[in-house]
Amino acid sequence: MQEIKCQNHDFPLEYFEDLGYSCHIFGQKSYNGVAILARCSVEDVKCGLPTFPNDRSARYIEAVVDGKIRVASVYVPNGGLVVNADEYMYKLEFIRRLEAHIRALNRQDEAVLIGGDYNITPDDFDVYNAKVWHERVCCSTEERNAFGQVLGAGYTDLLRQSFDSKTSYPKNRPFTWWDYRSAAFVNNYGLRIDHFLGNQRAENLVSDIYVDLYPRRMRRPSDHAPLVCELRDVDADVQ
């Protein structure tokens, strides 16, 4: 979970615990906040990027789930409204610190899966109208280059890998965010800014990945739709 917008003690623990989940939360009042919920064992929980100790925002949590895979939830800063503003520069710094941390994780002998709201479209294929969004925040060259550095740390954009990127602007492009205005969701004027990144060990466990559009159709939904990554329970794949 990302952008839970509450402190730890305000999180609806009982609701999720009644459903069988243990809840591991890194909250913040009114802003940000991330969490990992699991129905199996959770160990080695870490809150915040160790490579960004001065960051005051609750944007990163990781843990080893079921003793098999290290899972992280990340909420990358939005970047504000204008390229090169302070908020934008903070976003780039956060991404650089994230890349340094997950590069170190990939040196360990374990599967690593990092899901979350990255607030970046990897390229124009992930934008409903590339001309409208050209060099705007979430679609700027510098942000995309920084995202490429994250992938270069040994990770795969799992959803992108699952569809044919060579097809030019197909109608079924998987977006994950739509503005509340201008009937954006109905017209599929979306962006793909939520991603699951996996190292090779995690990639070998993926059985399916898709955007679940149903919650976005509900009354008073989030402007994001959930990105779902299903994993095979194959112990032999995680040595």
Image (cartoon, rainbow, N blue to C red):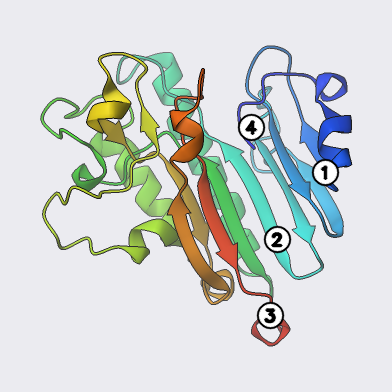
Report the side of 210 relative to 62 (left or right). Answer: left
Q: Which residue is painted at 54% across and 42% down in the image?
A: 116
On-image quarter of the C terminus: bottom right
- Discs 3, 2 touching: Cβ within 8 Å: no
Task: Kindly state the secondary structure of the residue where label 3 is placed.
Answer: loop
Which amino acid, mark 1? Answer: Leu
Q: Earlier in the sequence, mark 4 or mark 3?
A: 4
The crowding category of the residue bearing disc 1, from other C-alpha atoms within 10 Å (few below 14, some 14 to 19, many at least 20), is: few
According to the picture, the residue beneath numbered tag 2 turns out to be 70
The crowding category of the residue bearing disc 2, from other C-alpha atoms within 10 Å (few below 14, some 14 to 19, many at least 20), is: many
- Looking at this view, name the residue that lies furthest to the bottom: 236
Q: Earlier in the sequence, mark 1 or mark 4?
A: 1
Tell me residue 198's x, y (percent). 53, 63
Q: Quadrant of residue 129?
A: top left
- For the residues labelled 3 and 1, the Cα–Cα distance comes to 28 Å
On-image quarter of the N terminus: top right
Tell me residue 76's x, y (percent). 52, 33
The crowding category of the residue bearing disc 4, from other C-alpha atoms within 10 Å (few below 14, some 14 to 19, many at least 20), is: many
Q: Earlier in the sequence, mark 3 or mark 2?
A: 2
According to the picture, the residue beneath numbered tag 4 turns out to be 59
- For the residues labelled 2 and 1, the Cα–Cα distance comes to 22 Å
According to the picture, the residue beneath numbered tag 3 turns out to be 238
Which numbered dot is residue 19?
Answer: 1
Q: Which residue is painted at 39% across and 47% down in the image?
A: 147
92 relative to 204, above or below: above
